[in-house]
Amino acid sequence: MATYKKRGGRPKNKAEKISQIEEESTTAEVFSTLDEGASRTEAWVEKNQKAILIFVGVIATSVLGYLGFQNFIQEPKETEAMNEMFQAQFYYEQALTATTKDSLFNLSLNGGNGKFGFVDIIDNYNGTNAANLANYYAGVAYLNTGKYLEAIKHLDQFDADDANIAPIAKGAIGDAFAQLDQQEDALKYYENAASISSSKLTAPRFLLKAGIIAIDLGESAIALKHLNTILDEYPKSPEADKAILYIGKAEAMK
């Protein structure tokens, strides 16, 4: 059975008395040390109180400033920008299915019916998600109206973290470079678009474009790499049949 020594009793002999005195002395020293440490801390706090208050004030002001900016400036600005962009998006969506596209794309870019176009949204609401998205829309609109340098400029400024939109934006830059007959740049962007795409709809499409451009550049090995990837990884895609035809061209170049 476990036993323990009852503390606080009278010492029975000289050895116990000495032990009790030493224990009490050690305890007193510990408390004395703690008191001295606390005193030094209090003295340091008192000496540096002004600096501490300033530091705390700066942190508090920064936090409150950020929250105020988000709640009273950024969020209302975001809402206003999205509302302003509604008409431009309407023109853009109409242009995608219209027979005559240029006029509608131009309205989406420059505005109509007293509403902003994508260019106005970018200029007036810089730093918002709406302005970022407007760069994508503007880039595609410029691409469809043959203004390829403007298309590249806006698509390059579009910051996409969406797994579906990001590769489409990169591929559209590739299309613009291809139209400018800058094949090396086009190939780079098509490869980039294919590498970041997780979609069975977009990945084979950009791989096919990369393969075709590589053939135009006389790079048969690169072309075969991309075209064979379509057959290996996306055999049921619409691009697979086309890939077989271009593989024959690439192999004939060897």
Image (cartoon, grey):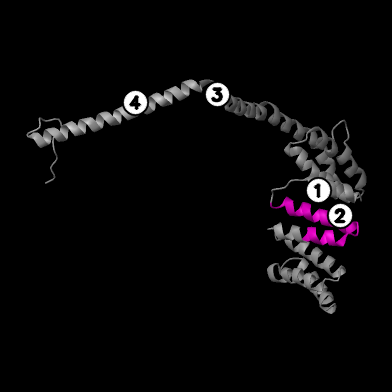
Residue 72 drawn at (x, y percent): 67, 26
Going by the numbered disc 2, the residue's amino acid type is Ala
Marks 4,1: beta carbons within 8 A:
no
Select label 4 or label 1 by which is in front. Answer: 4
Label number found at residue 35: 4
The reply to whether dot 4 and dot 2 touch (C-beta < 8 Å) is no
Give the residue displayed 84% in from the left and 79% down from the top: 252
First-in-chain label (3 vs 1): 3
Residue type at mark 1? Leu
The region drawn magenta spans 163-190
Q: Which residue is mark 2?
A: 176
Type of amino acid under label 3:
Ala
Q: Is residue 175 magenta?
A: yes
Look at label 4 and name its amino acid: Asp
**Secondary element at tag 2:** helix
Q: Earlier in the sequence, mark 4 or mark 2?
A: 4
Mark 4: which secondary structure?
A: helix
User: Would you say the residues marked 3 and 2 are in contact, meaning their CB atoms lie under 8 Å apart?
Assistant: no
